[in-house]
Image (cartoon, helix red, strand yellow):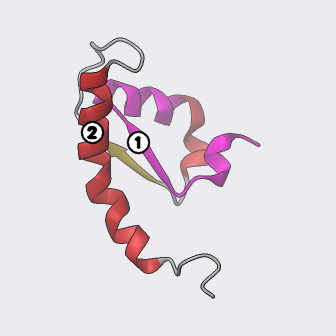
Amino acid sequence: MTNLDQADLIFVMERAHRAKLQRRFKPHLKGKRVICLDIPDDYDFMQPELVALLERKVARFLLPLREKVPPVGGG
């Protein structure tokens, strides 16, 4: 079992990343949505510009999902 088995939505930065993921883990990707963010892999780990770019690009995919999930607790 991999972390991919638990995912519904998978983000990659570049098309090359998506291709590599599909080559290595194709059986684990069945029924999954793999989204390429088209962000060049030229940034340092946790570089502020990269974090801001990821937040902006990923938000449009996650916000619609958030609206479908009921609040936790609710009391």
Residue located at (41% from left, 69% from top): 65
Q: Nearer the viewer, residue 74 or 15?
A: 74
Residue 11 - label:
1
Q: Image point 53% across, 58% down: which residue?
A: 8
Disc 2 crowd rating (10 Å Cα; few below 14, some 14-19, many 20+) is some
Q: Describe the element under mark 2 as helix, strand or loop.
A: loop
Q: Residue 37's mark? A: 2
Q: Nearer the viewer, residue 45 or 14?
A: 45
Residue 72 image position (x, y, % from top left): 61, 75
Q: Position of residue 43 (x, y in %)?
A: 30, 14
Magenta stretch: includes residue 34? no
User: From the viewer's perspective, is 62 left or right of 57?
Assistant: right
Of 30 and 45, the residue lying toward us: 45
- Please give the name of the residue rendered at 22% of the width and 34% of the height, measured from the top-left corner: 38
Which quadrant of the structure image shows residue 25?
A: top right
* 70, above or below 8, in the image: below
Q: Identify the residue shown where x is 30% and y is 53%.
A: 59
Q: Gap between marks 1 and 2, in whole Å?
A: 7 Å
Identity, as a three-letter code, of the amino acid under mark 1 = Phe
- Left or right: residue 2 versus residue 67 is right
Residue 40 coordinates in the image, percent (x, y): 24, 21
| Residue most extreme to the right | 1
Query: Cβ–Cβ below 8 Å for labels 1 and 2?
Result: yes
Residue 31 position (above or below residue 21): below
Q: Name the image quarter holding the C terminus.
A: bottom right
Q: Residues within 10 Å of mark 1 (few under 14, many from 20)?
A: some
Q: Left or right: where does residue 28 sit relative to residue 35? A: right
The x, y position of residue 51, in whole percent, is 33, 30
Tell me which segment is drawn in magenta: 1-23
